[in-house]
DNA sequence: GTGGTCTAGACCACG
DNA sequence: GTGGTCTAGACCACA
């Protein structure tokens, strides 16, 4: 899995990193139980600060995506990722609300918006599953 | 239009404010050509600094939602808001991608996600129009 | 002479007004000795504040474009407009410098820039004179 | 690059600053990819408030002259500055129109005006290129 | 009274 | 140490 970051983006690097890893899990490029590179090696690979990788891993751990075993190192949660809870529902709403409001103002068709979501959805879902 | 902000939130106050105003325009609580409160009065109303309101207004102006009329003051763009362009399409994708990726990991059904979007959409669209 | 102002412009109304009057003189739509409308009537015509018209007139007077006769009212300077002095030379430079610098950065050809100036020049100069 | 500002001038400090930086880019004293001083250090150097510098940087960023690299800091756009678009064409016209109108009134020869532009143009263009 | 500009000082997120 | 955000208070130009 190649991780490409945009250093000129408004999104913090650590957020981009967590997003990329979550995308990898969604696409099943990384599977439960699989080992992730160590903080040190990943930082060196990408060419970013240790703290930044660490912060990304901490966030993923807090969200239940990964576990930090003293021996095995960092692994994707073998039990799979925690299901969507109330807090994630709330997060989705908080993100979608302003986005959809602006879309409406800008005359984006509901149908077009839905098709965009569809498109993104299928871009992630593994073939066998769809 | 009553504007309620969450001062504990991680999203900056000025962003919340722009979001609320965009929502107001989407719901047609505020219509093109209508006057918005002055920076100072809105700041006083909400209980925040005028610079914070100013920043929100500037952002809305830059997006083409509002403009500064030398006689009327701050008004919602009478020509309506600029249609979705490539840059907004890109913005939508950048927001939706990580959200949908995480949703997939968390086992959110595509159907459920779509229904959530539907629900939010209809919450904005004016009755007569839907 | 019809004066059209843009109330949504960043340029102050009084500046737009002086610019329009100077343009009128340049195009010889208004000639030396000709009477301009009174502050009061012009303000009413355009639908702006008295003070604003007054400020424009004051600026034109200070630049030597118009005179304020107690009896005749406001007239275009019968002796013609004062020739370009050092101060106007300086003003031209101060305006042209940043404009040309940005034009160079933006890859505007010197030739193209010159042609634009030519075009604007001829748009003002009276036929018989060119 | 030494930046000298006129604190007595009518043009806002932040505008003077952006102008000076654009001039530096035009003269190739600053090249694409090059790092600009941090907001704080530049503010300290010039002896102005950091917010004023920030405003200048934001304006340059919005115009596409510079961007904020999360690792390198503020850098001149490595892809070069965006070419002149319709909006810049319009801006040029809005600046040149009143200037040329007044020049005509003040009996400035078209030839003289052109020579002034020439002179300013060549003052920016790098020797090797002209 | 309105927004524009400038200053000053403070806290936090980021890297 | 960097920029982002927020507050506060001040002066001025504009209408």
Image (cartoon, coloured by chain):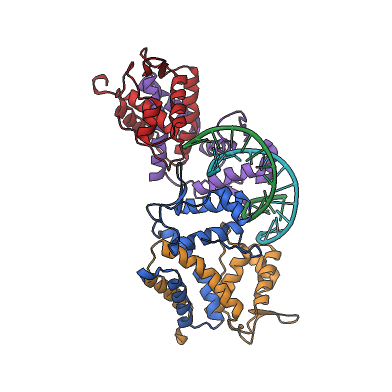
Chain colours: A orange, B blue, C red, D purple, E cyan, F green
x 41%, y 59%: residue: B86
Report whether residue D3 is seen: yes
Q: Horizontal placement of A95 versus C81: left or right?
A: right
Q: Horizontal placement of C101 versus A58: left or right?
A: left
- Residue that sits furthest to the top in the current view: C79
Q: Horizontal placement of C40 versus B14: left or right?
A: left
Q: Nearer the viewer, residue C71 or D31?
A: C71
Q: Position of residue A93 (x, y in %)?
A: 53, 72
Q: Position of residue A67 (x, y in %)?
A: 69, 80
Q: Nearer the viewer, residue B11 or B20?
A: B20
Q: Nearer the viewer, residue D105 or A71?
A: D105
Q: Position of residue A20 (x, y in %)?
A: 57, 71
Above or below: residue C102 compared with residue A130: above
x 37%, y 33%: residue: C44
- Residue that sits furthest to the left in the current view: C128
Quadrant of the rendered structure where residue B107 is?
bottom right
Q: Quadrant of the C terminus of chain C?
A: top left
Above or below: residue D60 compared with residue D5: below
Q: Position of residue D127 (x, y in %)?
A: 50, 31
Report whether residue A9 is seen: no
Q: Quadrant of the N terminus of chain C?
A: top left
Quadrant of the rendered structure where residue D70 is?
bottom right
């Amino acid at each position: 899995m190649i991780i490409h970051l945009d250093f000129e983006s408004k999104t913090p690097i650590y957020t981009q990193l967590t997003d990329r890893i979550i995308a990898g899990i969604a696409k099943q490029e990384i599977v439960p139980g699989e080992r992730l590179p160590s903080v040190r090696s990943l930082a060196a690979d990408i060419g970013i600060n240790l703290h930044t990788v660490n912060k990304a891993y901490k966030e993923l751990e807090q969200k239940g995506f990964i576990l930090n075993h003293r021996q095995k190192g960092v692994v994707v949660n073998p039990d799979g990722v925690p299901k969507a809870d109330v807090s994630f529902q709330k997060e989705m709403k908080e993100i979608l609300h302003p986005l959809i409001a602006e879309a409406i103002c800008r005359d984006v068709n509901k149908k077009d918006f839905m098709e965009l979501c569809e498109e993104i959805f299928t871009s992630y879902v593994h073939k066998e599953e769809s």
